[in-house]
Image (tube, grey):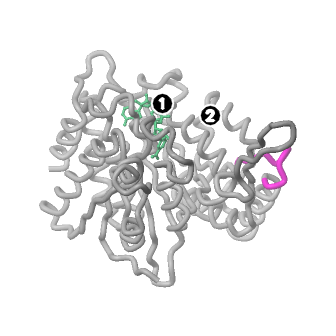
Amino acid sequence: MIKVKKRKILLLPGDGIGPEVIGEVKKIIKWFNDKKSLDFEMDEDLAGGCSYDKHGSPITDEVFYKALESEVVMLGAVGGPKWDDVEFSKKPERALLKLRKELKLFANLRPAICFEQLVSASTLKPEVVSGLDIMIVRELTGGIYFGEPRGIKPIENGERKGINTHTYTTSEIARVARIAFDLARKRSNKVTSCEKSNVMEAGQLWKEEVQELHDKEFKDVELSHMLADNCAMQLLRNPKQFDVIVTDNLFGDMLSDQASMLTGSLGLLPSASLGAKNKDGEMRAMYEPIHGSAPDIAGKSIANPIASILSFAMALRYSLDLDNEADALEKAVQHVLNDGLRTKDILSDGMKEVSTSAMGDAIISKLQ
Ligand code: NAD
């Protein structure tokens, strides 16, 4: 059993804009080490298409073991059109799935907060998104992305059949629902559980298990159930009705991307993927922006690093028990937005456009 090394942070910048945005996180980690004497041990390695190019594999065993012994993994993004024709098992995205699955990171926390300064950057009316603060908890290691059998097989008449299997066990549902209920207690005390219990047995089980856990341990939390398609609609109609949404891997993937647009840009949204605590209270975790490698803007120094920087703030809070430092970093981001600095994706009239690294530098200057 590989032990987690306290305060060890592994950076996996990945592909496309990944190295650009994680470069800004690196500066912030260095700042905390230099100015606050925090003894973060930082290491950096390859994952995704860059690893495939060098080693023929999206993640090598060596890097995987480094991830296993790190308290925090900070990932940028992986993938891009360059690797479209790579065999499925070696695609850059397999690195992500392997890390999530093997580190047993079953709970993906995706906050969607609409900063007051960016209300106008949303495509929705200001009154619909102003003050928005939702936490989406997505199950991350089960469901249709991992279920067996899977594959593409030939069938009669020269046709082919694509197969994926959606499965959940009671314990898989209960452990992620527990995270959602715990989080709700620290927020507005409301959980909405989303599934398709009207057409899927796995959805029916999901609903029953969430309800059972609620009735046994979380009666003080307000629980409602909603069909996932209705939730997609309600997120656009009246998103502020939600506090914590808990849902499966597939629906969570889509609903959280949809929620991101309520806030203005994919470039703003962080995420945390958490595992179970072991008997020593240690937890493996990976933090990453929810956006991808954005090949359309890679190398142009216009990527927004805020999603990655806020992901590091989540690492400070959830893995490193440094709430004050997390608050300080989140406030620094707010101050920079108050000053009117914007990367291109969130630029509006009267604001000043800055590059990726100028945004990182401005956030550091506010930390000072
Ligand atoms: P994407 O998130 O990379 O980009 C979608 C759009 O949002 C693009 O127009 C992009 O320019 C913009 N965008 C994204 N992040 C931004 C940022 N920080 N600042 C400014 N603009 C930003 O999604 P996509 O284009 O569908 O996918 C591109 C590649 O990324 C694909 O290979 C996909 O598989 C991969 N991907 C990886 C992850 C991950 O590593 N976690 C997640 C999603 C997609």
Q: Of the two numbered discs 1 and 2 on the same chain, state the one appearing first in sequence.
A: 1
Q: Which residue is drawn at 61% across and 56% down?
A: 139
Name, please, the residue furthest toward the top.
349
Spatial CA span between label 1 and label 2: 13 Å
Any part of residue 71 in sight: no
Residue 235: image tag: 2
Q: Quadrant location of ligand 1?
A: top left
Q: Is residue 131 above or below residue 44?
A: above
**Viewer-side label of 1, 2:** 2
Q: Residue 348 appears in which quarter of the rendering?
A: top left
Residue 208: image tag: none
Q: What element carries label 2?
A: helix
Look at the image and say whether residue 195 sits in the magenta stretch. yes
Q: Is mark 1 on a helix, strand or loop?
A: loop
Q: Does the residue labelled 1 lie within 8 Å of ligand 1?
A: no
Q: Residue at x 37, y 65 (%)?
A: 63
Q: Is residue 63 above or below residue 146?
A: below
The x, y position of residue 14, in whole percent, is 36, 49
The x, y position of residue 65, in whole percent, is 40, 71
Look at the image and say whether residue 101 sits in the magenta stretch. no
Q: Mark 1 points at which residue?
A: 130
